[in-house]
Amino acid sequence: MRLPRKSFRNFTLAVLIAAGGLVALFIGINTWVNPLWVSKAPWTDDSFAEYRPIYRYQRTGKAGIAAARPWEAGFFGSSRIDIALDPTLPQWGDTPAVNLAVSAGTLPETAPILRYTLEHAPMKTAIVGIDIGDLIGANSGYRTTGFMESPFNPKGNHIEQTFRYYAGISTFQSAVQTIINRSKGELPEYTPQGHRLRHQETTDVAKVIQRDAISHALRVIRRRKANPPTKGNDWKISQLQQILDDTKAAKCRLILMIPPSHATYLGVFYQQGDPDPTFSLDRGLMAKLVATSNKQHPDAPAATIWDFNDFHPLNAEPVPMDHSKMHWWLDGTHARKALGDVMLARMMGWPIDGPGADFGFELNEANAGARTEDLKTGYQRFQTEQADLWKWMERGILKYQDTAAKSSAKDEAAPGF
């Protein structure tokens, strides 16, 4: 039976009013709470800042954080930087610092994230982590990480993005969670400065290192043996070149850093006969690009490279077998804030009170060859001075070698964590 025309109009009007009311409710809550940092309004309550749960929407949340304050120092890269580097250390003094690294971030994300930040903040120092292997491998998961939907994407639909941020269901769900977090006094993973500081502990570090780090190294080595690396990936090189060009144009000091891996992850590449276990191709290419950029822009701050990926004792911390935590390491590929503090001190020239005064190597075009030899020597020293740890690594290789042979891995050395 058909409704009378007047009744149909009334029904339609009622539906539209209800839908409009719901949208208005979403907009009101989303702008009041600003859960992902991208729905700011004059009436936004900034007391929610500590409780905003951006973990599921890291790219969107960190884009909001990037534009939230006039940051002067920033960290960029993958989860290794996301977890390790603290922007709230007292050594920063009056310099507002921010951590804008993202999980599984590769150069095709890092370059536009840095450019976006330079456009929104008066950056004076940028610390950019490049996971070893990223310059050579063609892989990047940027299409599936949430980058494409975030403000970081220069080709994004900004009208659609704005509507989603202010009236979207996902933003509303995050707003509700933010309200719950504040009511319970529960802090989420990320701080308002973008540092992933909380809720990371693993219950069995030894098992996690063998299962995730060692098995991943085996898969990557299998790929690299099948297709030995002979040159850098043109796409990735162009992204690094963009980083160099953008920081030079902004007169921003650039520090490239090669984040560390635990010795039991790095050692697998040597023990298994990887075609280039020292990753000399990556290091040499990075050093050459930096040297050329510095020469072409003598009026801008010189870019430098700090390399922490070696067999230094801090990277060879014994792995506990009793479910206790490691001091310097969260797992086989992610350094804790404690080690991040040491790395920041080394890169920034701050005094170091405790171990780590000799941690890290300032890489350049002239000493890249010597660095290769140092790494080979470091591996030999690891076998003898850390014999128990080296043997445990070998047992892990035997345990997961068959699994790795049946699995696939991304064509790069950096873990996709």
Image (cartoon, rainbow, N blue to C red):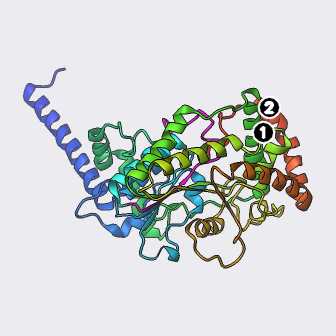
Q: Residue 230, position in %: x, y?
A: 68, 31
The amino acid at mark 1 is: Leu
Which type of secondary structure does the marked residue at label 2 adopt? Answer: helix
> Does the magenta stretch mainly form a helix, a strand or a loop?
loop
Q: Is residue 147 visible?
A: yes
- Residue found 43% across the figure and 48% down from its top: 113
- Nearer the observer, 212 or 388: 388
Q: Is residue 343 left or right of residue 313?
A: left
Region rendered in magenta: 123-145
374 relative to 292, above or below: below
Question: Which labelled disc corresponds to residue 42?
Answer: none
Instruction: Indicate yes or no whether the magenta region holds residue 86.
Output: no
Q: Residue 337, position in %: x, y?
A: 61, 66
- Nearer the observer, 239 or 213: 239
Q: What residue is shown with label 2?
A: 405
Q: Is residue 347 left or right of residue 73?
A: right
Instruction: Indicate yes or no whether the magenta region holds residue 130.
Output: yes
The amino acid at mark 2 is: Ala
